[in-house]
Each structure stands twice: as C-alpha cells, then as structure tokens.
Image: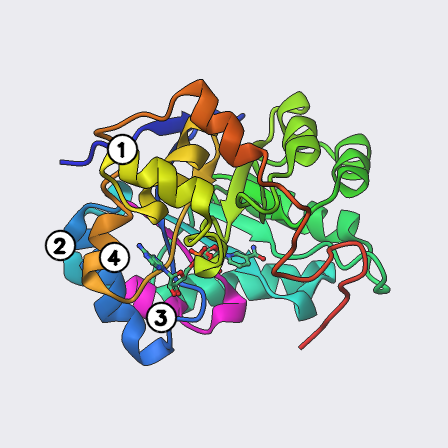
Amino acid sequence: MSTVPTIALNNGVSIPQLGFGVYQIPPEETKETTLAALEVGYRHIDTAQMYGNEQGVGEAVRASGLDRSDVFVTSKLNNGFHAHDDAIKAFDTSLETLGFDHLDLFLIHWPLPGIDVDFVETWQALEEIYRTGRAKSIGVSNFQPSHLRRLIQETQIVPAVNQIEVHPYLAQEDLRAVDAEHGVATEAWSPIAQGLVLDNPTITGIASEQGKTAAQVVLRWHIQRGDIVFPKSVTRSRIEENFDLFDFELSDGDMGLITALDKGQRLGPDPDTFNYIP
Ligand code: NAD
C-alpha cells in the first residue's frame, strides 16, 4: 500500500523515510490521530517520553489491526533520566506505557552538555538496552558535531540516527555532512518549520509550478536530500497531503533554491546551551 521508500540504518535495520510525528498532540487525541495516520498509510511513528502521549501511540497501533512488526516506532529518553540506571528504568516504563515488547528506535532526546551526568554514561545504558534486543536500533537527537564525535570515540556503538532540527530556514548542511561521514542517518524534525516556511515566495512559486502544496514541496525537498521526516498534523486532510509526496520530483535547480533559503533560524533551543530538566 505504501509508496514510502525505506532507508537502511547502519545496523541494517530499515526505516520508512516518511513517518508521522506526534509532538504536541494532546494525550487524549493521540490514539485517534495516530490511527488516522496509520489508515492513510504511515508506518513510522515518532513519539517521546517528553510528549506524554506514548500510551495513545501504542493503543493506535493495536487498534489498527496491523502487525506490530509492520509499524516502526521511535521514542526518546526524557531529560531527567540520563543517569545509567534511570535510563534503563525509563526505557522499561516506555515499553510498558506503549504496551510493546520492543521499540524500533530509542534516542537520547537532548545531549544536555552542561548537566552532571555525561551523555557517554547515558549512551552506555542505551547500548545495554540494544544488546538485549528490546530496542532494535539506538540513536541520538540534537547532537552537535562535537557531541557526536565524542560519543563515537568513547563508546562502542555508532548511533543509527541523529534527529535534529532541519527545514529550509535551517538547512544544516554542515551537521548533516558530519552525520553522513560517520554513517549516521539524519532525521529532520520540524520539517516544515511548524508552518513558518509555507508562505515563502520561492516555495509557493515552486509549488504552483508543480501543482503541489508548499508543504508537499518542502517535504519532498527533505526526501530528495535523503533525510528521514515525520511531519505532524491533527487534521486528516493535511495528514493525507503530507503523505502524498511520491508522484513528483524537484529539479536540482529547485532543490538548490530551497537550500539557499537557509538563514540559520532555529525554532527550538540551541543544543549547545540547552540543559533543561523537567
Ligand atoms: P512540523 O514542521 O511537522 O509542523 C507541524 C505543524 O505544521 C502542525 O502543527 C500544523 O500547524 C502545520 N502543518 C502540518 N501540515 C501542514 C500542511 N500540510 N499545511 C499547512 N500546515 C501544516 O513540526 P513539529 O511537529 O515540531 O515536528 C515534527 C515532528 O518532529 C514532531 O511531531 C516530533 O515527532 C519531532 N520533533 C522532535 C524534536 C526533538 O527535539 N527531537 C523537536 C520537535 C519535533
């Protein structure tokens, strides 16, 4: 049913390149919204302990009637649980809340470089979890080049992914190149910049030439760059629109025009200084 390409991670696991993100979906709406996404054809869901809606994701997967093995589910370690034993316990709690016996991907959500617990310790906990088979892949999120290099130098398993903020106003050419150099797949969060880029005239111009929407053009730009994306919406028509990316192609020229919109504009915090613990 799905026309979504898959990407092979550095441990051989396949991940659908297009998924559905559930950040800011209220817990009581998560089951219904995620189920709508699964009906549309999404087979990859991105949640996090921090979002407070893992339970609804698990319920949706069960209600869909799909096999657990047909849906790729990611969750992320919350910031308060970086110490080794806390990380293991928090992972177990995620599995319990989701009602799953494994996650497809588990990430350190933020590096928190200024806190007492070193993310190397946190990663060693994720390596242990990975070796038990209860997380089929492990990775990081919001890691800058210095964080990634240190992790790779000081630990055994190279992260499968680095999930970072990427959109046309923050094209992240350098960090994506560092990921690629180490065999780490880039996942682009806030891929349409929460809507901010959708009235940009370069993007709307390409959209009208293509007969597609601005959101579809931006998501297609990510897909052609090779990144993994999971746009979020609670609106059925947009959930469908964001999935309909595989009947057109952007030229190299249009790809370059969109990348040139980069102005280093972050929507989220700077990972080098963000040390928030809830
Ligand atoms: P997004 O770029 O996916 O934008 C979502 C918003 O854009 C929606 O709330 C809606 O207002 C609008 N929208 C969606 N589809 C649209 C369409 N077709 N037309 C017009 N407007 C549309 O932003 P996001 O939710 O912040 O990011 C996507 C996912 O990335 C999240 O759900 C989450 O899974 C992940 N994420 C991860 C981190 C991290 O630190 N790792 C941070 C933020 C988000």
- Residue 121 relative to residue 248: left or right: right
Q: Disc 3 or 1, which lies upstream in sequence? A: 3
Q: Quadrant of residue 118?
A: bottom right
- Residue 24 relative to residue 99: left or right: right
Gap between marks 3 and 1 measured at Cα: 39 Å
Q: Quadrant of the C terminus?
A: bottom right
Q: Amino acid at mark 1?
A: Gln
Q: Disc 2 or 4, which lies upstream in sequence? A: 2
Label 4, on which residue?
238
Q: Are marks 3 and 1 in contact (CB under 8 Å)?
A: no
Q: Amino acid at mark 4?
A: Arg
Dot 4 beta carbon under 8 Å from ligand 1: yes
Label 3, on which residue?
55
Residue 133 sits above or below residue 190 on the image: above
Across and down, in percent, residue 261 comes to 57, 40
Q: Quadrant of residue 259?
A: top right
Between disc 1 and disc 2, the foreground one is 1
Q: Quadrant of the N terminus?
A: top left
The magenta-colored residue range is 43-59
